[in-house]
Image (cartoon, rainbow, N blue to C red):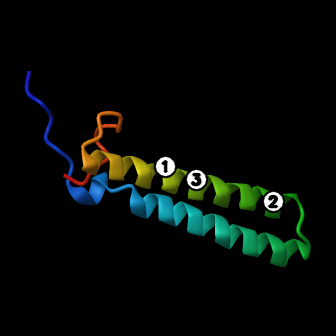
Amino acid sequence: MTDPPKLSHKFNDSVPVITAGTVLWVVAAVVAVLVTGAFGEAFWTCVAGIGVGLFGASVFTWQRAAARRGSRLAQSGVDDG
């Protein structure tokens, strides 16, 4: 059985997806404050989404750096090449 062809870098890069998701949470937080006029539950939900996005981006960056270094403990498939 042959291996499937590799995806192009355009479809394999997670950075734009992580960035876009975090930016959308920031926009949603601004809209939540403008609509409600207060820092209510919707705003704090958006803040949690921003925090999760930033945490995910940092873990992804850390894993990619470990893969580039050749660390045995790094996840496979997160490097550019």
Q: Which residue appears at 29% of the width and 40% of the height?
A: 71
Q: Amino acid at mark 2?
A: Trp
Q: Which residue appears at 88% of the width and 68% of the height?
A: 39
Q: Of the two numbered discs 1 and 2 on the same chain, state the one appearing first in sequence.
A: 2
SS class of the residue under badge 3?
helix
What residue occupies the far left of the structure in this picture? 2
Q: Quadrant of residue 73?
A: top left
Instruction: Answer above or below: position of 67 versus 47.
Output: above
Which residue was labeled with disc 3? Answer: 55
Quarter of the image containing the N terminus? Answer: top left
Distance between mark 2 and mark 3 Cα atoms? 16 Å
Q: Position of residue 76 (x, y in %)?
A: 29, 37
Which residue was labeled with disc 2? Answer: 44
SS class of the residue under badge 2?
helix
Callout 2 touching callout 3 (CB < 8 Å): no
Q: Is residue 28 left or right of residue 57?
A: right
Callout 1 touching callout 3 (CB < 8 Å): yes
Which dot, 2 or 3, sits closer to the camera?
3
